Image: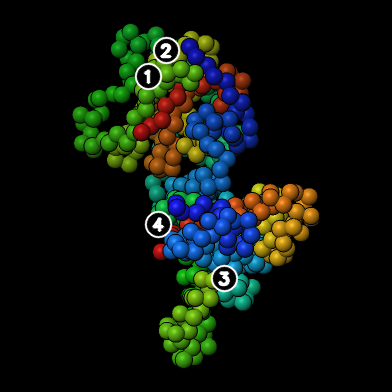
Amino acid sequence: MSIIAFPIRTPRYGGPVVTEAVAFDDDQETDVETVAARLVAGDETAVEEVYDRWSALVHTFALRALGDAHDAEDVTQQVFVAAWHSRHTLTPSPAALPAWLIGIARHKIADVRAARARDARKAEAALAVDGVGLAAEQSADHDVAERLVVRQVVQDLPDPRKTILFLAFWEEQSHAEIAEATGLPLGTVKSHVRRGLIHIQQQLEGVRRESR
Amino acid sequence: MSHAELDDLAGIALHDDDVPADVQAHIDSCQRCSEAVAAFVAARALAGAGPLVDAPAHVRDEVLAGLRGSRDTAAAEAPPAPIPLPVAPVVPLAATSTRRGVAPWLAGLAAAVALLAGLGIGRLTGGADPAPEAVDPTPETVVGVADLTALDSDAPRGVADAVEQGDTMTVRVSAEELGDDAGVHEVWLINVDGKRMVSIGLLPSGDKGQFEVPMDLIEKGYRIVDISIEPDDGDPAHSGVSLARGELA
């Protein structure tokens, strides 16, 4: 008889069972893929994790696109409830979740704009939403969404890379200034900035690929 | 020469001056590498967005309430599950302690059944019984089969399968060589996400049993069959000692 003891008297039947049953690494992308898979499988607890990780991205996107706090809150709520109901359409991959959520948000934002146009009974505005105005707004939205994705990608990086990238790309500091501020060798700072930029570009590519 | 390294391409995009001259020369003459540099420049230009703004806490509550609403509706429409089974990550103590209270009684029954097994009555409670199939025309579909093995070796410990028949899902366990340590054998389904598990019942005869489970449990990823040995200590949690395990596939 073979018995393997594992400490399971934890509040959530946590980690040790995981390591016994399935091998996981701590890789962020694997986490994202796992939570996406759980969402697709109908696990409601996955919604909470997805919400906690991406609601700020969706909310900020809606806020920028609509310029109204109340509408942005409504859109955020609708996006995550819609995400739950249409979870079967999600193909789990590392970049798919944010791309998919942003795609849903685009639709909800368009709905709000259409409703605004109707409410104002402005036939011209309604026409504009269907035509040229819509294209311009969507192009602007696309840019806003990508900028917010980059912000989140950098925020999610471990330090010191996160701090170095914020200093380099947000504060526009030179590599020498960053080396001075952080006490890291110049070569290390350069390397972090390059690797960080490569990571940003790859994440953007992933989101774009999934948005098609 | 070969294409430039990503590191150098990013370096060029960042106007670093320490990219070797021959690499720079290649990039200038290579469309693919030039495009890669342009993509890095574009990505760099997208940095600078202000901080993400969290939605107010009530939005989160409304989202979760929205999900619960849809689930309650679904539950009201669906037929009642054959066996009430807590599927929450944390098994409510009150719910399971009732079940636990029955355990010694079940253990007694198990012993009685074991005695009667020689008379051929054992099959009423254990193993797959072919008789109902003969009278029930509803076809059964095996949705998953698991070879059970010990955890510290690949030593075989029997088989389990999940069978769908009409609107019932049954997990059938036929274990062997679980040893004879004191305690009852409890069957669990561990989710493949490794984070959740539910108990689906006790093996009444010690090594064979079938358990009706909610239809969507397997679909939700609860596919790893685990058999534990449980002391009579009133603790509803898994004892931490698994005798056998296998994934329904």
Cα distance in 3D space between marks 4 and 1: 38 Å
Asked if the residue under mark 1 is in contact with the one under mark 2, i.e. CB atoms within 8 Å, the reply is: yes
Q: Which residue is mark 1?
A: B158
Q: What residue is shown at x 50% (from left), y 54% (from top)?
A: B4
Badge 2 amino acid:
Glu
Badge 4 amino acid:
Thr
Few, some or many residues within 10 Å of mark 1 (<14, 14–19, 20+): many
Q: What residue is shown at x 45% (from left), y 52% (from top)?
A: B1
Helix, strand or loop for disc 4:
helix
Few, some or many residues within 10 Å of mark 4 (<14, 14–19, 20+): few
**Camera-nearest residue between A187 and A159:** A187
Kindly report which numbered mark, 3 or 4, lies closer to the viewer in this rendering: 3
Cα distance in 3D space between marks 3 and 1: 57 Å
Q: What residue is shown at x 49% (from left), y 30% (from top)?
A: A21
Q: Which residue is mark 3?
A: A144
Helix, strand or loop for disc 3:
helix
Q: How is the image coloured?
A: rainbow
Asked if the residue under mark 4 is in contact with the one under mark 3, i.e. CB atoms within 8 Å, the reply is: no
Helix, strand or loop for disc 2:
loop
Q: What residue is shown at x 70% (from left), y 65% (from top)?
A: A172
Q: Chain of mark 2?
A: B
Q: Which residue is mark 4?
A: A89
Helix, strand or loop for disc 1:
strand
